[in-house]
Image (cartoon, grey):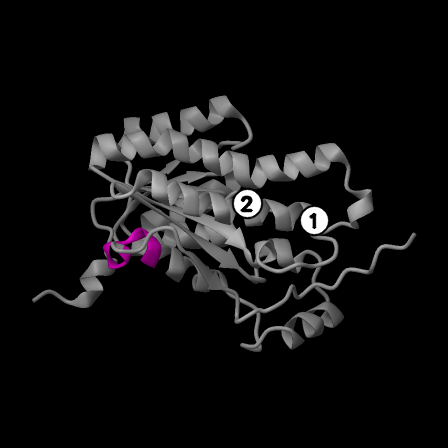
Amino acid sequence: MSSILDRFRLDGQVAIVTGSGRGIGAGTALAYADAGADVVLSARTLSQLEETAGKVRAKGRRALVVPCDVLDPEQRTDLVDKALEEFGRLDILVNNAGGWPPKPTLAVSESEFEECFRFNVTTAFEMTKLAVPKMVETAGGGAIVNISSAAGRFNARGFAAYGTAKSALSFLTKNLAQDFAPKVRVNGIAVGSILTEALSGFMNEDLERQMLAKTPMGRLGEVEDIAACALYLASPAAGYVTGEIYGVNGGLTQIQVEMPPVEF
């Protein structure tokens, strides 16, 4: 009998990871490389992608760098096409590109609200539509992992745009799982506050104390916490799992960042 750990291997598989120049995307790409996959790295900043690619190659796996703005339909198509040209198959797609800062609700314009939704939901929908037929055609099936957020689970001031978008992404994940089963599994991760460059850019001691006080696990998350779950969801170990949103957020029951109430 083989080891249960063999079910977490991705040998011979190919994964596209959007937003993989740094942070969660880069960490996930490296986790997949550790498990034996070749990785297509995609983001807007070439220098960051090249850095991640070097780390993938140091693990003995192939890395293809494809700069891509997922908001651009032509660039999305080119990303999938180049992945297939290079590797001849596609097994995994991680829709990680996304994000949006909290902002007082009455200050959010219509265009900002729609752009937030487009960045976090529409791009994942369109990438999935491009990838799924190719997964079935070249590999017989596959796995989608959508990076959602705890902000899509809990109500909080200042998160009308981002929280709504991530809630929609989680619901979309569940719907797509029904559409594509049993060939392609679709799951998501409701991410909490993770120690990345994006977070450190506005972190200070007071904010960190506030966030830790609302986190049952008593610490902020690390990239590897998310990468480990993303590996599980993409691997044969999760072969009977689809339509699920896994909370990797330290046990949150509320948003850690408290915005001021609306003043009229």
Image spot of residue 208 (x, y percent): 68, 70
Left or right: residue 136 compared with residue 73: left
**Element type where label 2 sits in the image:** helix
Q: What stretch is highlighted in magenta?
A: 232-238
Q: Give the main secondary structure of the magenta stretch.
A: helix
Amino acid at circle 1:
Ala
- Residue on which disc 2 sits: 168
Disc 2 marks which amino acid?
Ala
Query: Does the magenta segment cover residue 235?
Result: yes
Marked residue nearer the N-terminal end (1 or 2): 1
Camera sees residue 46: no
Q: Which of 13 and 253 is in front in this view?
A: 253
Above or below, 161 relative to 44: below
* Residue at the disc numbered 1: 160
Q: SS class of the residue under badge 1? A: helix
Is residue 22 left or right of 151 when viewed as pictured? left
In the rendered image, the quadrant that contains the N terminus is: bottom left
Residue 165 place in picture, x, y as percent: 60, 44
Measuring 50% from the left and 24% from the top, which residue is drawn there? 73
Task: Determine the residue positioned at 52% across, 58% down.
Answer: 191
